[in-house]
Each structure stands twice: as structure tokens, then as C-alpha cells.
Amino acid sequence: MHKPPKIPKFQQVQYQFSAHIRDPENIAMPDDIEQRRMNIYTELFYNNIDNFLSSGFPVLKKIISEKSWNVMVRDFMVKHQSRSPLFNEMAYEFLTYLNNERESSSDPVFIKDLCHYEWVELALSTTDSQVCPINFDDQQDYLAIQIKTSPLAWPLSYPFPVHHISPEFQPSEPSEVPIFLLVYRNLDDEVLFLELNPMSAKLIDLLNEGKTGQQAAQQLADELQHPNPKVVIEGARELIHDWIKRSILIYPS
């Protein structure tokens, strides 16, 4: 029976070095490394992680205590094995940690939804995606053609009003109805959001399914059993015109 290959000494030191940096209270530091130098590495690594998470999730950091934040950052470092070595992808790694590894009954009930919303803002601000906006023309019947949301416009739904959460407002229970948001980056590279109602959110979904504005509006009118479908159709027209002007809607590629 073959014995497993022995790990070279330098790799053993590397593993212990990185493990100690992640969890200095429970993992012994490698031999032959000066304590002062080890403390510098440990502090530098923690501060880098802390700074990236602080910039990625500023609202979360504001609404929990400094002690709770520091414990969470350390817990992330200990438990999560990042799939990417890139610091600019750390926010997504933190989301993965919250969904799969985080175990704390003291966290706000909305923490996962809030952090997803904050990550969306960061992701849209840093993505390399480009769009070809529609040059709005008053003479064009945009209800008659297919249009869809740009890759820089993300329709979202949350059980909590994540866009309002702050130190002064922290809901303890989900909203009675879902919160629909449309988060987008405009041509000036500003990340903005629109709050949608269920019907405007459904209109977005139908457009993204490939329906024309006319078909989508007619379906909404039928589902609402509206006595005057023209009202629904004209409402859809106004929304679609506004979304085109904001570069939220584009032609399918």
C-alpha cells in the first residue's frame, strides 16, 4: 500500500502561515517566524479584508456594532474559502459566505437581502458591460417592437425594503408584499434605482420574455380584467418611453 506523498516542509509552513493569519486566536503561528513580523502580516491581511468589505457593504457596517462587524469579518476569514484571488470579487465571496456558512442568530433578519442589494450596486458600478442606447424618437411606436432591459439594468425583488434600511430604519419582519426594484447604471455611470409596483415589474418581465410592449400591456390588461384596456396600454407606453430615455431598455442584440 502506497503512503501518501509527504508535504514538503516549505508548504507545511505556508499552510500554517495562512491558517494563522485567518485565525490567529486558534491556530498556532509557524516556528522560526518572529512574533512581531507575524503580527504585522496578520494585521495587514485583516485590515485589507476589512477595508474591502467596508467599502462594499457600507450600510451593513453602519447598522451593526463595531464589535459585531469585527467578529463577522473574522468569521468570514476563518470559514470561507474564496474561489477567486481577486480583491474586487470579495463582495461576492462575502455574499456566498452569508448564504452558506454564516451562523448567527443575532444577525438582522434582512442581512442577506441588504447585502445582495449592496453587492448589486457595486457590481453594476464596476462591470465592463457596455450598452448601445436607443436614440428616443417621438415618432417611433415602441409598443410595436421588441425591447428588453439592458445588461446594466437589473430587475430585483426583495422581501424587505432594502433601499430604505439605515441606522434609523431596520424592519423586523418582511413586507406584506414583495419590494420590486430596478437598479441600473446610466450613461453617466451613476448607479440609480427605481421602485416598481407589481404591474410595472410584470411589464419588465414580459418584455424580457420577448413580448412587444403592445402584447405585454394587453396581457396585463387581461390579467387585471381592466374595464378600459387602453388605460393600461397608455400607462405601459409612458413607462416604456421613460425607461428608454433612461437607457434601461435597449433593442435585443
Image (cartoon, grey):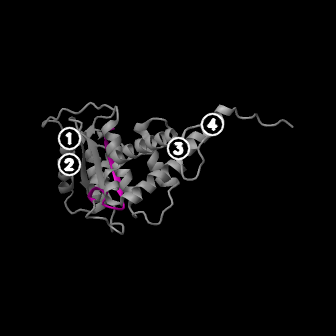
Residue that carries the numbered disc 3 in the rendered image: 21
Residue that carries the numbered disc 1 in the rendered image: 246
Tell me the quarter of the image containing the C terminus: top left
User: Please, what is the three-letter code of the amino acid marked with disc 2?
Assistant: Leu
Whichever of labels 3 and 4 marks the residue nearer the N terminus, that label is: 4
From the viewer's perspective, is 223 left or right of 73? left
Disc 3 to disc 4, C-alpha distance: 12 Å
Whichever of labels 4 and 2 marks the residue nearer the N terminus, that label is: 4
Residue that carries the numbered disc 2 in the rendered image: 239
From the viewer's perspective, is 229 left or right of 96? left
Q: Residue furthest right?
A: 1
The magenta segment is 150-164
Whichever of labels 2 and 1 marks the residue nearer the N terminus, that label is: 2
User: Please, what is the three-letter code of the amino acid marked with disc 4?
Assistant: Val
User: Please, what is the three-letter code of the amino acid marked with disc 1?
Assistant: Arg
Disc 4 to disc 2, C-alpha distance: 61 Å
